[in-house]
Amino acid sequence: MSDVLLVLPLLIPLTTAAVSLLAWRRTGLHRVLAVAGAAALLGAGLVLLAFVWGNGICATQAGAWPAPFGITLVADLFSAIMVVLAGVVGLAVVLFSLASMDRGREAFGYYPLVHVLLLGVCGSFLTGDLFNLYVWFEVMLMASFMLLVLGGERPQIHGGIKYVTLNLVSSAVFLAAVGILYGLTGTLNMADLARKLDRMDQTATVTAVAMLFLVAFGIKAAVFPLFFWLPASYHTPPGAVSALFAGLLTKVGVYALIRVFTLLFVQEAGFTHLLILVLSGLTMVTGVLGAVAQQEFRRVLSFHIISQIGYMIMGLGLAGLTDSPALATLALAGSIFYIAHHIIVKTNLFLISSVARRLCGTFELKRQGGLYQTQPLLAFLFLIPAMSLAGMPPLSGFFAKLSLVQAGLGIGQYAIVAAALMVGLLTLFSMTKIWGEAFWKPSLQAAAADAAPQDLVPRQQPMLLLPIGALAVLTVTIGLGAEAVFTLTWRAAEQLLHREDYIQTVLGGPS
Amino acid sequence: MATLLAIIIGCLYAAGIYMMLRRSLFKLILGLVLLSHGANLLIFTVGGLTRGNPPVAAPRADAPVVPHADPLPQALILTAIVIGFAVLAFSLALFHRGYQTFGSDDPDDLKVSDR
């Protein structure tokens, strides 16, 4: 049973992409398949989550070779939560694309590429082997390169060159780190590595390798000071693509950071996790200050991604700096809660920015305006994720920040708590900036717009607003049902901290 | 042998990073190529250099004859080379398109999306 469940989140997007590629000219079929595939992925993710909740961590060996040699797939609650979120984002973005993507991009394989991207993302979440993680990263990157430059507009090419270069550097660093780790331990299976690294006495070398992983995943996650590719590229592709990237890509980097720094590199936590904590504070502050200075809808949001990444790794840093299991669990649970909240909210905000662009003809906030007057429903739907991002109760962002701040106070890291609270205030400031400029301000003459403003075609309107509305409802639901979600993330954090369960599930037998 | 390879890897990394810092998109690609070759050689070297028998067990034998080379790093490198090749082909096409679009090979002339 668990074998099938673990393979399904990979098989579904792979099949969808492959069948779509076989029917290359039939764009209509691509659209149908893409929606069906994304819905099936979400379903498979939910079943997997329910199964892991009931039965604990599950693992399978593809090809039936025993554990350290085979291709290991593992799902603990954290992986399962991430797969569900990938399904949610995938479905929302595909539905939004049905109404917003242009014919040219659809004809050149937009939908199959989205599913290849989802394949790479789910593979990264489910693999139990470091080298396979590299391969899944490359699958994801290749699809993201193509989605980013599909269409070939000038800004896209420019953003693409930077994005491709920095991600290739990150891959080279990652590969080198994997190689050195193999040389040290003779294995790449993460559970086996965890066991062998604990018995090693060359902690200095291991920490050096850990730093290589920090750089490699830090570039992917856009951590300070490695984030420059993100605001240079995320605002260039069409709205649906940037929503997909904003929701998922950096979070795969964060997932990898949390995975290796809870499972593998915990020997020198006083150094490595303190460094992560310092980086998280700098990431938060630089990200939000960058956002305050921007005047373009999607660039404001891009800088906010960076700032939010800081919160996600803040919990990871805190968890390594305490001896109390309860506080460490609280910090990690806060991180996971934050990731879940952020993925939903950020995807939604990018989708809304795309609708605003369509209505006003530009992404420049100065030249937008009057959306509250013409589209009150859209304005309302913007307020929900925007306030959630800033951490207003009772929305999802409030509870995510609350648990991180509680953990920070409990562990006694007051500086990071102060930074987190200040950054929340500045986030609120830039969300009110968007609200004031794009929604509240009276409508301007659209003479200066880049493209002619369009009214929403009545036939398209439900298709554009449905995913936005659904994600907003999800944000409110997470906020109102915070206790249930928190119980889930708490157990996920407990699993991350009890490494023995993971190791034994993969390798079998006592250690 | 390991020392020699270590020096070569160091040179590859240094040359790769130097090329990436040059003000030219073409040299940027060359730098990336050198960097990924450096990483591949690194895996090969730290995996242990052994001259000896093939790591295949003879018929009716339990284990291959020692000393034999570890086949896993070579499998990893092969995978990495294939991926690197595909990524390189893509980035060449992208950079060529960039050159056509902007009419320049200098990254500083590409100022449209980031201010």
Image (cartoon, coloured by chain):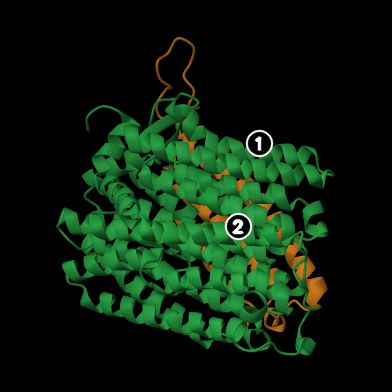
Chain colours: A green, B orange
Residue at image position (45%, 84%) is: A429
Image vertical order of residue A189 relative to residue A216, above or below: above
Q: Residues within 10 Å of mark 1 (few under 14, many from 20)?
A: some
**In-image side of A170 versus A195 (left or right):** right
Helix, strand or loop at mark 2: helix
Image coords of residue A430 (percent x, y) = 49, 82
Image coords of residue A254 (percent x, y) = 43, 59
Q: Which of A248 and A69 is in front in this view?
A: A248
Residue at image position (31%, 73%) is: A278
Residue at image position (35%, 68%) is: A398
What residue is pinned by disc 2? Answer: A467
Residue at image position (66%, 58%) is: A96
The amino acid pointed to by label 2 is: Pro
Q: Quadrant of residue A467?
A: bottom right
Helix, strand or loop at mark 1: helix
> Considering only order in the chain, which callout, 1 or 2, is on the residue closer to the N terminus?
1
**Residue at the limit of the structure toward the right, as seen here:** A25
Q: Quadrant of residue A309?
A: bottom left
Q: How crowded is mark 2: few (under 14 residues within 10 Å), some or many (20 or more)?
A: many
Q: Specify the label residue A359 is tagged with.
A: none
Image coords of residue A311 (percent x, y) = 37, 68
Image vertical order of residue A389 relative to residue A144, above or below: below
The chain carrying label 1 is A
Which tag is nearer the camera, tag 2 or tag 1? 2
The chain carrying label 2 is A
Q: Do badges 2 and 1 share one subunit?
A: yes
Q: Nearer the viewer, residue A427 or A61?
A: A427
**In-image side of A93 versus A52 (left or right):** right
What residue is pinned by disc 1? Answer: A15
